[in-house]
Amino acid sequence: MIVTENALPEDLACKEAVELFSDYLDGALSEELSALCEAHLRECSPCVTYLDQLRITVRSLRVLVMNGLPDEVKQTLLVRFREFKSQ
Amino acid sequence: MTDADTLTALRHLDEQAFTTLVEKNQQQMIRIASLYVSTRASAEEVTQETWLAVLRQLDQFEGRSSLKSWIFRILINRAITRAKKEGRTIVLSALSNEEASGDEPAVDPSRFLPDTHPRWPGHWSDAPQPWTPETDLLGTEVRSLLAAAIESLPPVQRQVITFRDVEGIDSREVCNVLGITETNQRVLLHRARAKVRNALEQYFREK
C-alpha cells in the first residue's frame, strides 16, 4: 500500500494519495510522485478537499505562536548580560 | 545582520546585538524547552541559563551549523538534563525510530472502499466534507483544540510538528537540532499533521 520511488504505480488510489500529501505540501516529493499526486487531484474532488484541510491545518498551527517578550524577562537577561560583561 | 556579524558583535559583548538576538528567539526557546521540562517556569529558567551558556561558549562555535541551530542545541541539551532531574526521561533517536515505524494510516482505513472493489479500489467511501468557511480558525476554541491535539501526540511527533509548523523552522534545521533522520522527520510530520487534521475534522463534524 505504501507508494515509493521504487514501486511507482500508474495511478494512485485515494488511500495512497493521502499518505503523500504532507510531503506534497512541503515540495518534498520527487517529480514523479508529485506528478502522480497532481494527476490524482485533477480527477478527485474529495482528495482536493482533504488536501485543502491539511493546508488549513498547517496554516492554523502558526497562530499558536505568541510573540513579544515581557519587559521583566528582558530586564533580568540584561542584568545577567551586564554581570557577565563585567566579569 | 548575518550570523557572522552577530557573532562578531557578541564576541565584543555588544549589548544591542545580544538584546536583538534575545528578542528574536526567546519566546520560541521557551516554547521548545516546554516540550521537555515539566513547567513553564522551568522552561524559562532553562532558557535563561542557555543565554549565559551561549555567551560563555561563543568561542567554541565553529560555524558548522547556523547560530540558531547551535543555540537550540545548547537549549535542548540543557532542557533534557533538567527533564532528567525532574524524572522525565527522553531518548529521542530511539523514540523517533519507534514512532516512525509500522503502519499508521493517515486516515481510518474504514473510510475507503476495499482494495477488492471492482471499480474504485482504495477510493473514498466516506469522503471528507468541506469545513464551514465561516468558522473562525483563529478563535480561542480552535486554538485550544489545536493545542490539545498536539499535546496528545507521541513525544517526537509532537516535537517535529511544533518545530516545523508552529515555529516554522525548516526541515534541515529540525533534523539537525533533534538529531533525527530526514526520512523519519518526514514520516513523523506527516503522521502528526494527519492526526491534527483528524481532530479538526472531528470538531467540524460535531459542530
Image: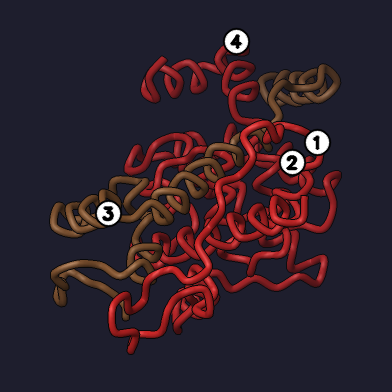
Chain colours: A brown, B red
**Vertical relation: A24 (above or below) A73:** below
Residue that carries the numbered disc 2 in the rendered image: B143
Most foreground residue, B194 or B88: B194
- Residue drawn 80% across the image and 41% down it: B141
Q: Amino acid at mark 4?
A: Gln
Percent x, y of residue B104: 49, 77
C-alpha distance separating marks 3 and 2: 33 Å
Circles 1 and 3: CB distance less than 8 Å?
no
- Real-space CA distance between mark 1 and mark 3, rounded to the nearest whole angstrom: 36 Å
Do labels 1 and 2 touch, CB within 8 Å?
yes
Circle 2 marks a residue in which chain?
B
Q: In the image, are marks 3 and 2 on the same chain?
A: no
Disc assigned to residue A43: 3
Horizontal and vertical percent position of residue B187 = 42, 66
Look at the image and tell me whether residue B56 can be seen.
no
The type of residue carrying mark 2 is Arg
The residue labelled by disc 1 is: B140
Chain containing the residue with disc 4: B
Callout 2 secondary element: helix
